[in-house]
Image: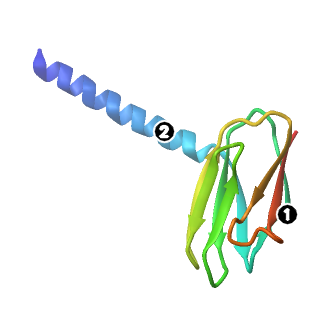
Amino acid sequence: MAARVTRRAALAAVLALAAGTAWSQSLATYAVVIKNGRIEPARLEVPAGVKIKLTIKNEGPGPAEFENLDLRVEKVLGPGASSFVVIHPLRPGSYKFFDEFHPEHSEMLIVAK
């Protein structure tokens, strides 16, 4: 009986891992580049009510930070580094992101429709 429970637990773990992998691959993914204190694209339209994934790459010579305080999103990247953030479903509206290392001219607006 114990062996049967162990096999079931192992099968459940494998199925959960496979489901998680399929889930992460099905997210709408958008590329963001930070370079010389600028975030590109400056405006990004995404569907409201859907989880999204943003891949972020710092192509600048110094550190960069991708941040939105209201959504509690913060990602610090060294020069040449790449990473990603998953943003839970957004309500329709606009969400401002910025690079705290370059606040004077780094702004990106995500518009959820």
Tell me the residue that label 1 is attached to.
Answer: 42
Residue at 56% across / 44% down in the picture? 24
Which image quarter: residue 108?
A: bottom right
In the depicted view, which residue is nearer to us: 89 or 16? 89
SS type, badge 2: helix
Residue type at mark 2 is Gly
Question: In the displayed structure, would residue 38 be above or below residue 17?
Answer: below
Residue 20, disc: 2
Residue at 12% across / 23% down in the picture? 3
Q: Residues within 10 Å of mark 2 (few under 14, many from 20)?
A: few
Give the x, y percent position of residue 77.
Answer: 57, 69
Give the x, y percent position of residue 56.
Answer: 65, 63
The N terminus - image quarter: top left
> Mark 2 or 1 closer to N-term?
2
Question: In the displayed structure, would residue 96 be above or below residue 99?
Answer: above
Q: Residues within 10 Å of mark 1 (few under 14, many from 20)?
A: some
SS type, badge 1: loop
Residue type at mark 1 is Ala
Which image quarter: residue 66?
A: bottom right
Give the x, y percent position of residue 57.
Answer: 64, 69
Q: Outermost residue, top direction?
A: 1
- Lateral position of residue 112 relative to residue 68, left or right: right
